[in-house]
Amino acid sequence: MERLGTGIGWRPEIADAVERMPGIDWVEAVAENVCPGHLPESLVRLRERGVTVVPHGVSLGLGGAERPDAGRLAALAERVEALGAPLVTEHIAFVRAGGPLTASPRLEAGHLLPVPRTRDALDVLCENVRIAQDALPVPLAVENIAALISWPGEEMTEGQFLYELADRTGVRLLIDVANLHTNHVNRGEDPAKALAELPLEAIAYVHVAGGFERDGVWHDSHAHPVPQPVLDVLTDLASRVSPPGVLLERDENFPEPGELERELGSIRGALEKGAAEREAARRG
């Protein structure tokens, strides 16, 4: 897989800072916020410098009962071409319900909702992923999401579900270690167990983000500093495999550039610690 290095989520609010930030190998932009015919000047300049730009979709709804919308897939493919991206990413989630085939009007959740970890849901997800793969000009990677609840009757762990998805479709995985931590707090799931069950060779890159806990619930805010428990999950992952890329996400409440650079330094430190553990294990 292509080595991406260390990156940061590109957002208009921090565009100037990202351009000046040292050590940024690549950026990720929310696909739906980019107009292919009128790319932001900041992204154009980054691309001219050789910085890779990866579009990150949020609206396909690959986990939904309906097949992916052809228009949305075409729009995502157009953004891939405009950005010269080596891959494109989306979420393992559903984002809408209802519509002509149901008794309800179409409803847009405005949020990424978790897919039940059942065999039936996996079958639907696999078919939707295959349709998306066929429509996109570059490899697709899909991201595990944060959730507040577990669906009743689930038949697989998160790691087992992701393993089967990758095995059956060949899709790559975007592993969000902050979401693994979120699900640890909110659903009592062990991040180490999830990592142990993953097909590590399928990892395209890794997301790292901050959040906060309130009344026993972890909120994946993308608006707070990355906490140590999330960095610890990243170290655990890096002790098992060298991820092709790692990216810091921040969506609001943007700090000064210096703070973002310190967070990137902490991420690099967590990776180095994990790599040292991996090498020590290799030597026995």
Image (cartoon, helix red, strand yellow):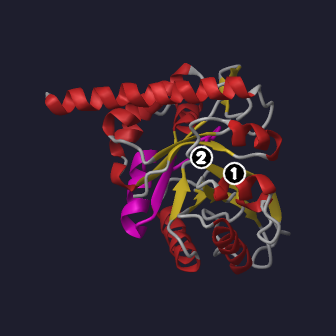
Label 2, secondary structure: give it.
Answer: loop
Q: Position of residue 3 (x, y in %)?
A: 43, 52
Instruction: Specify start and end residues of the magenta stretch as a single range.
Output: 146-175
- Residue type of the residue flagged with mark 1: Leu
Q: Residue at x 63, y 28 (%)?
A: 261
Please check the rendered image and state whether residue 220 is part of the magenta-colored stretch, yes or no. Answer: no
Is 205 or 219 nearer to us in this picture? 205
| Image position of 206 with respect to 86: above or below | above
Q: Position of residue 18 (x, y in %)?
A: 70, 40
Say which mark, if any, is on residue 145.
Answer: 2
Say which mark, if any, is on residue 112.
Answer: 1
Using a 10 Å C-alpha cutoff, classify the residue at mark 1 as few (fewer than 14 neighbours), some (14 to 19) or many (20 or more). Answer: some
| 167 left or right of 188 in image | left
What is the quadrant of the C terminus in the image?
top left
Q: Residue at x 55, y 77 (%)?
A: 131
- Judged from this view, the residue extending furthest toward the front is 49
| 42 left or right of 168 in image | right
Please check the rendered image and state whether residue 168 is part of the magenta-colored stretch, yes or no. Answer: yes
Is 142 or 35 nearer to us in this picture? 35
Query: Do callouts 1 and 2 mark residues in contact (Cβ within 8 Å)?
Result: yes
Using a 10 Å C-alpha cutoff, classify the residue at mark 2 as few (fewer than 14 neighbours), some (14 to 19) or many (20 or more). Answer: many
- Judged from this view, the residue extending furthest toward the left is 284
